[in-house]
Image (spheres, rainbow, N blue to C red):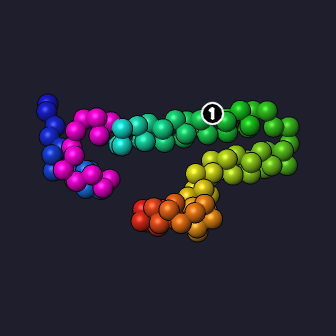
Amino acid sequence: MSHNFDHVPWDSLIGEEGNRSLRQWTTRIMFSNVIKFIEGATIIYASFVVIIQSRDAIDLLKDFAALLVISQADNIMFNVASGGYLGEHLSTRANGLR
């Protein structure tokens, strides 16, 4: 069974309209999604370890709060950049992605 995904405008979505090479797709689409998958798997594993090692409910809540901050670090940095705290160039680029 052969799939043809020529109708999917992924090149224009990433701002590289007309550049539909395998290398472009691999570096801009596949790599970022693999990294997101690894991030999710790591958080699930860390959550499992935290649950197994917790002695009481207070320790469990404290550890999950720390895991939440770590897992949301990319969103926090994006919002910091969007707010202009990391310079005008990054602020412009982050606001252009919204």
- Seen from this angle, which residue lies furthest front? 88
Occupied quadrant, residue 87: bottom right
Give yes or no for residue 30 being in the magenta stretch: no
Residue 22 shows in the view? yes
Q: Residue at x 60, y 60 (%)?
A: 86
Q: Circle 1: is it few (<14), some (14-19), or many (20+) Cα within 10 Å?
A: few
Q: Position of residue 72 (x, y in %)?
A: 62, 52
Quarter of the image where the N terminus is located = top left
Q: Position of residue 52 (x, y in %)?
A: 75, 32
Identified by mark 1, the residue type is Tyr
Give yes or no for residue 20 being in the magenta stretch: yes
Q: Is residue 42 above or below residue 7?
A: above
In the visual, does 59 lie left or right of 87? Answer: right
In the visual, does 28 lie left or right of 74? Answer: left
Q: Residue at x 32, y 53 (%)?
A: 14
Q: Which residues are magenta?
A: 14-26
Q: Nearer the viewer, residue 17 or 39?
A: 17
Q: Nearer the viewer, residue 95 or 71?
A: 95
Q: Main secondary structure of the magenta part?
A: loop
Q: Position of residue 69 (x, y in %)?
A: 69, 52
Q: Mark 1 highlights which residue?
A: 45
**Secondary element at image label 1:** helix
Q: Residue at x 21, y 43 (%)?
A: 20
